[in-house]
Amino acid sequence: MAGTRLGGSVTETATGNDFGEAARQAASALRRVAAWRMPASRWAAVAAALDAVGQSWQARDGERLRLATARLALAGPRLVATRHEDDPLVPAPPEVYERSNLLVTEILNRLEAPPPGGGEDGSPGGSSDDVSRGASDDGDGAGA
């Protein structure tokens, strides 16, 4: 068990910042999907890119996540429409919209969560120190 945990920690230490940055970039790209309008035929590529983002996120693979995010961006709307794209622009199909929202929520919740074992952030993590200080400051004795 300890070996597995150490292996996970080493991987996180070696790629932790890179993975965190890749996750932030993915969340940023995922947020944009809801505003996209494209021909209906192009949404299949977005769905495939969302699957790649989800798989790389689940695998905690920063490099794959970065590549999947780039794939998602490339699947999105083009800046310059070609004359062959006369099809009407439509919003994301419900399943694509829902999948992108679930992924962005999951990524942001994980990024914002305090690390296991207590956090410096505020309430939930640092309570043992607060309790100790409170006991000595508040104490049964009158104070000083």
Image (spheres, helix red, strand yellow):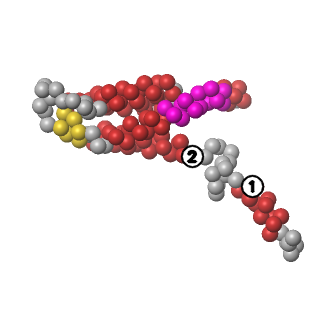
Residue located beneath label 2 in the image: 113
Q: Please state the horizontal and vertical placement of residue 64, each as a whole percent of the image.
A: 46, 24
How busy is the neighbourhood of tag 1: few (under 14 within 10 Å), some, or many (20 plus)? few
How busy is the neighbourhood of tag 2: few (under 14 within 10 Å), some, or many (20 plus)? few
At label 2, the amino acid type is Ala
Q: Earlier in the sequence, mark 2 or mark 1?
A: 2
Residue located beneath label 1 in the image: 128
Q: Magenta stretch: dominant SS? A: helix
Q: Please state the horizontal and vertical placement of residue 110, each as a whole percent of the image.
A: 53, 42
Q: Is residue 113 magenta?
A: no
How many numbered dots are placed on residues in this image? 2
x 86%, y 75%: residue: 142
- Image mark for residue 78: none
Give the secondary structure at mark 1. helix
Marks 2 and 1 sit apart, C-alpha to C-alpha, by 19 Å
Q: Is residue 69 left or right of residue 133?
A: left
x 74%, y 59%: residue: 130
Q: Is residue 11 magenta?
A: yes
Residue 8 seen = no
Q: Is residue 55 above or below residue 114?
A: above
Residue 83 seen = yes
Q: Which stretch did the figure color magenta?
A: 8-22
Q: Camera-side residue: 79 or 143?
A: 79
Q: Please state the horizontal and vertical placement of residue 91, each as a whole percent of the image.
A: 23, 41
x 69%, y 28%: residue: 6
Question: Is the C-beta separation of discs 2 and 1 under 8 Å?
Answer: no
At label 1, the amino acid type is Ser
Q: Please state the horizontal and vertical placement of residue 54, each as a whole percent of the image.
A: 43, 32
Q: Which image quarter: residue 55?
A: top left
